Amino acid sequence: MALRGLGKRVRVSFGDDPQVVPESLSFLPGQELVVPAAAVPAAPALVLAFDAASEERLGLLRANAFAADALVVFDHHASNPGFGTVRLIDPAAPATAVLVDELLRRLRVPLDQSIATCLYTGIATDTGSFKYRATTPATHEMAGRMLATGIRQDLISRQLWDTTSFGYLKVLAGALERAAFEPEEAGGHGLVWTWVPYQDLALFGVTVEEIEGLIDVLRKPAEADVALVLKQDPDGTLRGSCRSRGAVDVAAVCARLGGGGHVYAAGFSAREAVESAVQRFRTALAEVAATPGADAGGPGAR
């Protein structure tokens, strides 16, 4: 929206398949700019990539991005290997939206309610509603500037965290029934994990995106430092989301499995049986927990 306001021709897209904006984000303005990945030029003049921790996260748009004259990467994941022709990567930033805010300020783009809604949503979600360790006084100062435009943060928060379908409750019930607690894992710090089969999602009409918050329920038990949720796609691919309370660097764990993320919040994908994926996670968890100086707590920690 900022670039359009500066007179630029802009296409917005994302590499997920299927390309569906989650219901929790349906309120975001600017969606008239969103086009399917197939509508993105094969070799654009410029591609700006946001919050992609690795080139694989570009998904359907990976080839287009690397065929561009310039690929600018905005990110705050410590595990980012540094791809693209221009890299604006700050692991100390609590959210990629912070980097976008600074860019817009340097471009002298006026902050209106539409842009503020997007930036506030980005910083609120990436900080877990300002609960994660990376949240700083500057984070709240930025949020304050967004609120000063008159946006309704109460309605944004309700849509993001407090609104679900009834089907989600049924899927959540099944996931909690399958939850397992393994106190000896993670070097004795404890692991709690569960998984969601695609059949449950199909039965109750729930998308994978709708259950992103399930990990925040599973991470609550005080007995376990690490929590893991495996979500199954229609093709059988397992998407793993994990969190740590602080004893283990889960970004390092997920990196061993081909994924990455933040010190306290990371993920990976796997094409294998659930028990096999969990066993590989246990092994990586044990290796990281046994590494000297492996205690989590870097600048990007959540």
Image (spheres, rainbow, N blue to C red):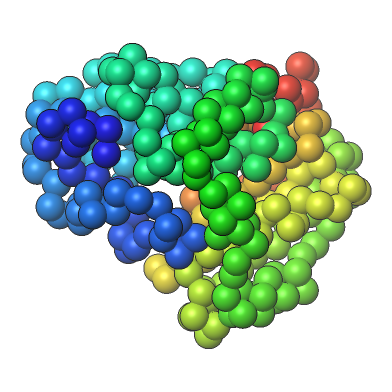
Quarter of the image containing the N terminus? top left
Q: Residue at x 42, y 71 (%)?
A: 234
Quarter of the image containing the C terminus? top right
- In this picture, is 152 found above or below 141? below
Q: Tell me residue 151's x, y (percent).
A: 50, 44
**Who is closer to the viewer here, 40 or 230?**
40
Which residue in the rendered view is the most extreme toward the bottom? Answer: 203
Q: Tell me residue 68's x, y (percent).
A: 14, 30
> Left of 228 or right of it: where is 114?
left
Q: Tell me residue 174's x, y (percent).
A: 70, 76
The answer to which quarter of the image holds residue 248 is: top right
Q: Residue at x 67, y 75 (%)?
A: 169
> Left of 120 or right of it: where is 129?
right
Q: Tell me residue 81's x, y (percent).
A: 42, 23
- In this picture, is 11 found above or below 253? below
**Who is closer to the viewer here, 154 or 23?**
154
- In this picture, is 201 found above or below 277? below
Q: Residue at x 64, y 62 (%)?
A: 162
> Left of 52 or right of it: where is 3?
left
- In this picture, is 183 found above or below 135? below
Q: Residue at x 54, y 49 (%)?
A: 152
- The answer to whether residue 285 is visible is no
